[in-house]
Image: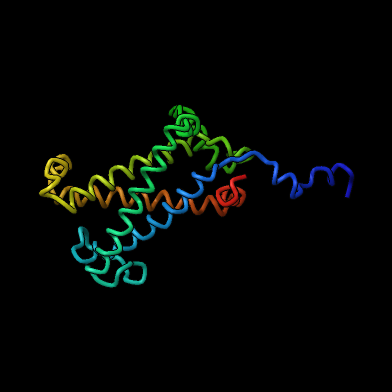
């Protein structure tokens, strides 16, 4: 090994002094949100199977709750966890300026450029502290989907108490389709998110240790 190679090899002290990419509150809310979303999606699939919107059902092996009543208990428990954790995350994201720094601006031309670079395998991930335009769009989009899925879920859960919200979505039946569409977009995001985490392992490590 040459002297140059030796000096470029990361050490434990280098890792300890590396800049913090994700502060503790981001990591904590991220993993709580991941758990809540898995519970919500799994139990939601079981609830869907009790009254399918389309000509298919989700396999019981990937659903949560075993039956409708059990799925509803899981769904409501996860709902409160998701809402409370989401409020903490969004509030801190706004107050600390993290959303403004990380997610904006989103320029269509840059989104197209980075998307094409990703398709060619030429999108750089050297600096994890900086989100590319595709990441900005996806993260902003999943936050919006989170708002929609909570709002549509409330209109389905309490269509009388929240009749104005149910009416906003075009009625109870339409709200179910909106809820399903929001769930589908979140599942698609999570699939891409997990795949990229394995393709760029240091991004997963950063979300665990922060650096």
**Front position in the image: 115 or 184:** 184
| Residue at the image point whose x is 32% and y is 69% from the top | 59
Drawn side of residue 35 relative to residue 55, left or right: right
> Which quarter of the image is occupied by the C terminus?
top right
Q: How many marks?
A: 0
| Residue at the image point whose x is 22% and y is 62% from the top | 55
**Front position in the image: 199 or 6:** 6
| Residue at the image point whose x is 25% and y is 50% from the top | 179
Q: Where residue 174 appears, x then y in whole percent?
A: 16, 48
Drawn side of residue 10 relative to residue 38, left or right: right
| Residue at the image point whose x is 39% and y is 59% from the top | 38
Residue 17 vs 194, above or below: the answer is above
Quadrant of residue 43 in the image? bottom left
| Residue 56 appears in view | no
| Residue 32 appears in view | yes
Q: Where residue 61 appears, x then y in whole percent?
A: 36, 71
Q: Where residue 33 appears, x then y in whole percent?
A: 41, 51
**Front position in the image: 202 or 55:** 202
- How did the renderer colour the structure? rainbow
Residue 131 vs 38, above or below: the answer is above
């Amino acid at each position: 090994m040459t002297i140059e190679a030796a000096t470029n090899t990361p050490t434990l002290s280098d890792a300890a002094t590396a800049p913090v990419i994700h502060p503790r509150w981001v990591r904590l809310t991220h993993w709580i949100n991941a758990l809540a979303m898995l519970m919500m999606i799994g139990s939601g699939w079981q609830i869907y199977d009790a009254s399918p919107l389309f000509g298919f059902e989700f396999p019981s092996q990937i659903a949560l709750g075993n039956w409708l009543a059990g799925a509803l208990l899981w769904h409501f428990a996860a709902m409160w966890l998701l809402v409370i954790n989401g409020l903490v995350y969004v509030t801190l994201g706004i107050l600390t300026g993290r959303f403004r720094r990380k997610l904006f601006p989103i320029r269509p031309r840059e989104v197209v450029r980075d998307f094409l670079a990703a398709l060619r395998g030429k999108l750089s991930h050297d600096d994890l502290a900086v989100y590319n335009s595709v990441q900005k769009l996806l993260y902003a989009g999943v936050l919006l989907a989170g708002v929609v899925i909570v709002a549509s879920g409330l209109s389905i859960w309490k269509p009388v108490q929240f009749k104005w919200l149910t009416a906003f979505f075009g009625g109870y039946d339409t709200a179910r389709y909106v809820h399903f569409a929001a769930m589908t977009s979140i599942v698609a995001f999570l699939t891409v998110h997990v795949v990229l985490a394995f393709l760029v392992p240091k991004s997963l490590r950063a979300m665990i240790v922060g650096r």
